Image (spheres, rainbow, N blue to C red):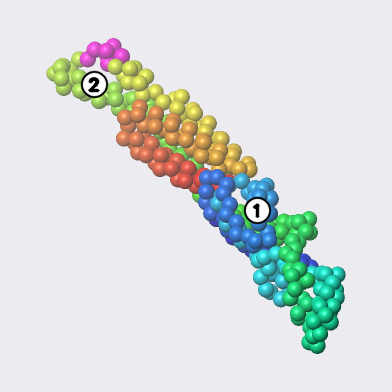
């Protein structure tokens, strides 16, 4: 199912924004675009999203900004001054200046330019401090996305119900057509025998025997019973929800197996037409099932 969610949270260390999109997919996949200083959270983010949604392809973009709106895509750099080392440099240079009889004054810029006096260190925000904010913004964005998916889900529910009801109507029609098909076969066989034998009398025992063979070979009672059972299960699962995509797809496969068997047995044009209609509906059910969690 498709959807989109966006959110942001503000904390003392800055602002975190999340945008997440979902697309139809049979399994769970996620692509994440994170700032360098948040890459350590990649696995944790995936696991957290999987607790909310089990199926679909997701694209997540997280950004961090300071209070002025500037991106904080890298770790912060802090300046450290080694005051003790600078004092030793100053003492050593002052002593050297006296020995050499130099009058030039030592400047601060000269001292801080010396090795290891001025140090730039990258600092990382505390994980325990940042994670709650990341979790919060993802939850907010996911809430918006799920609301959009639920809206789409209501349309899918109506569409699936329509196809399931169409299958049920066609199954009922096929069930009613069977006695008519047997009667039609008996009449057609009687007429054919008379045409071939040029006789007005028939061997009724032989005729009924042939009709019985036809009825046995075209018996679809078991298949119809299983079809009706699958339809009941489809309706039940559709109302229950809770990760029904794979269940719907599985039952739709079972429906397809039964209707293929029926299609190979029935000879009635009317029944064959309903078989084609059922197959078309099953294809639509399976297609929609791929889009449902």
What residue is pinned by disc 2?
Answer: 190
Seen at 55% across and 51% down, the residue is: 57
In this view, the residue in front, 7 or 127, is 127
Task: Kindly state the secondary structure of the residue where label 2 is placed.
Answer: helix
Q: Where is residue 28 in the image (x, y as percent from the top left)?
A: 57, 47
Query: In the image, which disc is placed on residue 217?
Result: none
Q: Position of residue 107 (x, y in %)?
A: 79, 83
In this view, the residue in front, 270 or 20, is 20
Q: Is residue 171 left or right of residue 212?
A: right
Q: How many marks?
A: 2
What residue is pinned by disc 1?
Answer: 42
Q: Position of residue 260 (x, y in %)?
A: 39, 32
In which image quadrant can residue 21 be found? bottom right
User: Vertical placement of 194 versus 61: above or below?
Assistant: above
Q: Which callout, 2 or 1, points at the residue further toward the start of the chain? A: 1
* Magenta stretch in the rendered image: 202-209
Q: Main secondary structure of the magenta part?
A: helix
User: Vertical placement of 55 versus 15: above or below?
Assistant: above
Which marked residue is nearer to the observer: mark 2 or mark 1?
1
């Amino acid at each position: 199912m498709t959807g989109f969610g966006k959110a942001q949270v503000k904390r003392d260390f800055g602002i975190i924004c999340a945008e997440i999109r979902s697309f139809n997919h049979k399994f769970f996949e996620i692509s994440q675009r994170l700032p360098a200083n948040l890459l350590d959270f990649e696995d944790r983010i995936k696991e957290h999203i999987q607790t909310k949604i089990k199926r679909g392809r997701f694209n997540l973009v997280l950004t961090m900004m300071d209070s002025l709106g500037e991106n904080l895509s890298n770790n912060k750099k802090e300046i450290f001054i080694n005051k003790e080392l600078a004092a030793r440099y100053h003492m050593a240079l002052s002593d050297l200046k006296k020995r050499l009889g130099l009058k030039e004054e030592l400047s601060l810029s000269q001292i801080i330019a010396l090795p290891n006096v001025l140090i730039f260190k990258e600092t990382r925000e505390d994980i325990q401090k940042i994670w709650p904010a990341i979790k919060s913004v993802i939850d907010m964005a996911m809430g918006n996305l799920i609301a959009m998916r639920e809206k789409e889900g209501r349309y899918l529910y109506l569409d699936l119900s329509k196809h399931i009801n169409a299958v049920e109507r066609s199954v009922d029609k096929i069930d009613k057509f069977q006695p008519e098909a047997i009667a039609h076969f008996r009449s057609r066989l009687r007429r054919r025998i008379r045409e071939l034998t040029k006789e007005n009398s028939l061997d009724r025992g032989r005729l009924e025997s042939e009709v019985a063979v036809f009825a046995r070979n075209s018996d679809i009672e078991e298949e119809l019973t299983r079809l009706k059972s699958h339809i009941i299960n489809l309706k039940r699962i559709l109302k229950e929800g809770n990760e029904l995509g794979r269940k719907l797809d599985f039952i739709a496969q079972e429906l397809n197996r039964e209707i293929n068997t029926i299609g190979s047995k029935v000879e009635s044009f009317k029944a064959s037409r309903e078989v084609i209609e059922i197959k078309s509906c099953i294809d639509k059910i399976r297609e929609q099932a791929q889009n449902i969690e």
